[in-house]
Image (cartoon, rainbow, N blue to C red):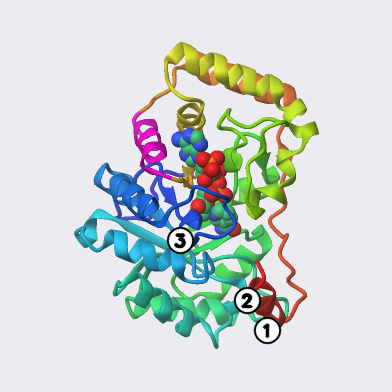
Amino acid sequence: MVDHLFEGSNVSKIGLGTWQLGLKGWGSGYEESELVDGLRNGIKNGLNFIDTAEIYGMGKSENLVGEAIREFDRRQFFIATKLAGFNASAKRVKKSLTNSLNRLNLDYIDLYQVHWEPSVYTSIPELFLELEKALKEGMIKHIGVSNFSAESIEKANNSMKESKVESNQIKFNLVERPNSKLLDFMMENNMKLIAWSPLAQGFLSGKYSAGNRPTGSVRRINRLFSTSNFEKFSPLHTELKRISEERKISIVQLVLAYEKHLGVLPIPGFRNTKQVNEIISANSIILSPEEIKSIETALRMIGPIETSVGFYPRFLPNFIARLGFLFI
Ligand SMILES: NC(=O)c1ccc[n+]([C@@H]2O[C@H](COP(=O)([O-])OP(=O)(O)OC[C@H]3O[C@@H](n4cnc5c(N)ncnc54)[C@H](OP(=O)(O)O)[C@@H]3O)[C@@H](O)[C@H]2O)c1
């Protein structure tokens, strides 16, 4: 994967995800003050890439991120936020962008990503021309997408006059990956892969099992936490445990260090400062060739689950999709 990452910006190799700051769906024990403190601690210790979105808690996450970053110099953090797919049209983009800027209390956003592919009734070229306008006006510094196929990225790139889509944020971790066609396309087009769910929502943390599943609606509907998947990936869990014990680091640190080694940008979510501290330490861990080989051997024996980027209901008109999200 490319390593130039957002030309001119000094971005950490591991970032922080803030879906959890939306305070919805993650189960018990997620407290506003702990999350804000955790985020501040991360930024203080060099994790400057912060990912949020207008839909996380319907603006709550952006508000709390805005509160957390207030005490820092603007050059100390790089904010990536997302335009919801149901607002992704030339007509609505400016309003969403202005609202995000207000919630974050910023006068520009470093990376503005289209959260998922827009409805089939929306013109991708018109949307990206509007985004290019926002770039020229200085409201955003870089254009990115999330959960986009190669075809849609190509359409977006062909429509813009001077700009290119610089990153695609996709589900990517040791057990879940998209097909190599998308990964090859991104590599050929010098795009950064921003890895969401880098810990497979905790499936890779080593603390869950078929008899001890996480709570909260987000993970209750995640089929990865099924009994058959715990069985399938048990040899990988065993190997990760062995390597992490030998190296005297946690499984989470091992997983993040391996993803960093691949050149992707993992953006783990967190529940408190303790977890952020582990993520901070992972930022400086460099794995040995033997450790990498052991992980890859275990992975080759099982094979990841192939994920699809097109899982959002693109055939729904935007106003229906927007209503649907009120119930999530
Ligand atoms: N673009 C998209 O469509 C999209 C979709 C999903 C997420 N995202 C972004 O990606 C970010 C990360 O993805 P994610 O939140 O789905 O999953 P994740 O980062 O794979 O997992 C986050 C969870 O892992 C556990 N964890 C974190 N650090 C830990 C540690 N040190 N030790 C043990 N457990 C630890 C915590 O859960 P527990 O402690 O409760 O187990 C935490 O909530 C999100 O916050 C969001 O910014 C984007």
Secondary structure at numbered mark 1: helix
- From the image, tell me which residue sits under label 1: 319
Residue 58 position, x and y percent, is 52, 71
- From the image, tell me which residue sits under label 2: 86
Does label 3 or label 1 sit earlier along the sequence? 3
> Could you tell me what secondary structure mostly forms the magenta stretch?
helix
- From the image, tell me which residue sits under label 3: 52
| Vertical side of 301 occupied by 35: above or below | below
Hey, what amino acid is under mark 1? Phe
- Name the residue nearer the viewer: 301 or 33: 33
Does label 2 or label 3 sit earlier along the sequence? 3
Q: Which residues are magenta?
A: 272-284
Res 235 quadrant in image: top right
Secondary structure at numbered mark 3: loop
Does label 2 or label 1 sit earlier along the sequence? 2
| Vertical side of 56 occupied by 203: above or below | above
88 horizontally vs 212: left or right: left
Residue 256 position, x and y percent, is 48, 34
Residue 226 position, x and y percent, is 76, 38
Hey, what amino acid is under mark 3? Thr
